[in-house]
Image: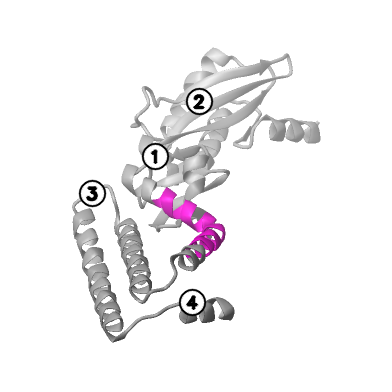
Amino acid sequence: MQEFVSGLVQNSSFGAWDVVLAVVVLVVGWFVSVWARRGVVVALAKWSGLGPSGTNLVARLVRYSILLLTIGIVLTVLGAPLQPVLAAVIIISAVAFLALRGIAANFGAGLVIQARRPVRIGDSIEVEGVAGRIVELTGRSVLLATSDGRTIRIPNTMLLENPLWNASESGSVRSEVRARLHGSPDLDRICPVLLDAVASVSSVSSVSSVSSTDPEVFLHTITPAWADITIRFWSAYDDREAARSSVVRAVAVALGGAGLTCSVSSDGPRFLTALVDAVD
C-alpha cells in the first residue's frame, strides 16, 4: 500500500492552481453531498411506503456516492494516473462487496418490507418456527417479542425468503381440543353439550375474516370402548393459549356433568393415547 501511494505521488505533477482547484472541488463536493442527502430525505418523506430507516439509508448511499465521485475528481485534478486509481476503486469495491454482502441483502430486504408493508409494528407473526409480536422494524432486522418474554431479532431476508404467517391480518386463529370419551356415548346428545360449553368461554371469538367461526365437533375414532372427537374454535391470537385452557376445562366439566368419563387435552391424540394406556 505504501509503494502504491509513493508511486501515485511521484507520478503526479501539479501546481498551486491545481491544489486550489482540488480544494474547491472537495469543498463543493462536500456541500453538494450534504444538500443531496437532505433533498433525498425530503423527497422520500412524501412517499408513504418508505419508513424513516429506509429513507435515511437511501440518503446516506447518495451522499457517499457523491463523496466518492468527488474524491475521484480531486485525484484527477491533481494529476493522479487513472489506472492506479481505477484499480484501487475496483479492489476496495470488491472487498466491500464481499464483506458487506449479507448486510446489503438485509438492507435491501428492509426497503422492500417498508415499501410493500407485508408486516407492521404490532403485528403477530410466525416465520421459520419463530413466533412473536413485532416491536421494531429496522433497516436490517425485525425485533420480535415472544409470549415467554424473550426478544428475537430476525434478519429482514427471512421475511421475504420464507413462508410468513401474519396472524394479525385475520384477526383470529383456530385452535383444537381433543377429547376421548370412554364407553359408548350418545354423540347426538353430546355434540350440543360440547358446542354450548365452548360457546360459554368468553375468549372464544365470534368475529374473523374467515367465513365461519362457529365451534365445530368432529368424530375421529369410535370403538365399543371409547370415541375420539375434536372440537375446533377460534380466538384472538394473543388469547389462544388462555382460550385452549378454558375450553379444555369447560369441555371436561360439561362431559362430567353428562355422566361421562373422559380425557380432554389440547396436545393432540398422542397425549390422549398415552394417558389412556397409563390409566388402563
In depth, the one of 158 and 98 nearer the eye is 98
Q: Main secondary structure of the magenta part?
A: helix
Task: Give above or below for 162 relative to 219.
Answer: below
Task: Give above or below for 250 relative to 155.
Answer: above
Q: Position of residue 113 (x, y in %)?
A: 38, 47
Three-letter code for the amino acid on which mark 1 is drawn:
Ser
Read off the residue under disc 2: 194
The tag on residue 136 is none
Neighbourhood count class around disc 3 (C-alpha, 10 Å): few under 14, some 14–19, many 20 upward? few
C-alpha distance separating marks 3 and 1: 39 Å
Badge 2 element: helix
Three-letter code for the amino acid on which mark 2 is drawn:
Leu
C-alpha distance separating marks 4 and 2: 86 Å
**Mark 4, mark 1: which one is toward the viewer?**
4
Circles 2 and 1 in contact, beta carbons < 8 Å:
no
The tag on residue 48 is 3
Residue range in magenta is 89-110
Read off the residue under disc 4: 8
Neighbourhood count class around disc 2 (C-alpha, 10 Å): few under 14, some 14–19, many 20 upward? many
Three-letter code for the amino acid on which mark 4 is drawn:
Leu
- In the rendered view, does 57 fall on the left or right side of 145? left
Q: From the image, which quarter does the N terminus lie in?
A: bottom right
The tag on residue 202 is 1
* Label 4 vs 2, first from the N-terminus: 4
C-alpha distance separating marks 2 and 1: 15 Å
C-alpha distance separating marks 4 and 3: 48 Å
Q: Position of residue 111 (x, y in %)?
A: 37, 50
